[in-house]
Amino acid sequence: MKVIEQLLINAGIAPIAGVDEAGRGACAGPLVIAAVILHDPFAPALSEVRDSKEISEKKREEIFELIQSIATSISVVIVPASEVDSRGVHAANLDGMRRAVHGLDQIPAYVLTDGYAIEGLGLPNLAVWKGDQVVVSISAASIIAKVTRDRIMCDLDSQFPEYGFAGHKGYITTAHTSALNTHGVCIEHRRSFANIAALIHK
């Protein structure tokens, strides 16, 4: 799991930033991108850090607080649904990644991302296949992004209780589709997504 980061550190390339996003495939709510620099990705305290999708909600919350307490630097960018619509999800994601990296307190010597290289970043960076599973720094960013977004969606659930955002977090589930058919779309839905556009233009 630690090969890429270890190779960079052995070569004297540090600090390393990991970058990941949450909410790319959702049809409601924001896209959240996090960049994280860890002083020591291999610290025993970080042994439970892994892809956020592989961890229970309770454990994610615990590890989120741990990362917040020991990370060298964390930067989070929240891209609202309206910006995802106006720019497209991929362009919004790449720009969010650039903004997250440049929002760090330190300039990283190298940036590792999950799946997508960051075009125009101006820093050495590498897209790692399934990076949130094989790079600790990316896994940490995955947890920061996921927990941040989940908390936002729970807040939105109190504003729009008819959609059940606290349960499905804005993804296209059967329950969410049923709520959309009953109540229509709200301001937090991404109108550029096919299922939402189809409802609007019925």
Image (spheres, rainbow, N blue to C red):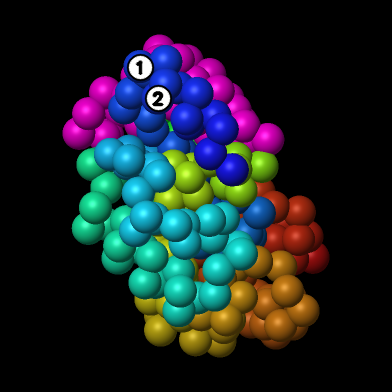
Q: Is residue 114 above or below residue 57?
A: above
Q: Which residues are magenta?
A: 101-129
The answer to whether residue 60 shows anywhere in this view is: yes
Which residue is denoted by mark 1 in the rendering? Answer: 12
Using the rendered view, name the quadrant where residue 86 is placed.
Answer: top right
Residues tagged 2 and 1 counted as in contact (Cβ below 8 A): yes
10 Å crowding of disc 2: few (<14), some (14-19), many (20+)? some
Q: Position of residue 130 (x, y in %)?
A: 66, 42
- Residue 117 as seen in the image, left or right of residue 83: right
Q: Residue at x 37, y 18 (%)?
A: 13
Q: What separation in Å lies between label 2 and label 1 (alpha carbons)?
A: 5 Å
User: Which amino acid is tagged 2?
Assistant: Ile
Q: Residue at x 76, y 54 (%)?
A: 194
How many marks do you count on the picture? 2
Residue that mark 2 sits on: 9
Above/below status of 25 relative to 1? below
Give amino acid for label 1: Gly
Is 181 located above or below residue 151 in the figure?
Answer: below
Dividing the image into 4 quarters, which one contains the C terminus? Answer: bottom right
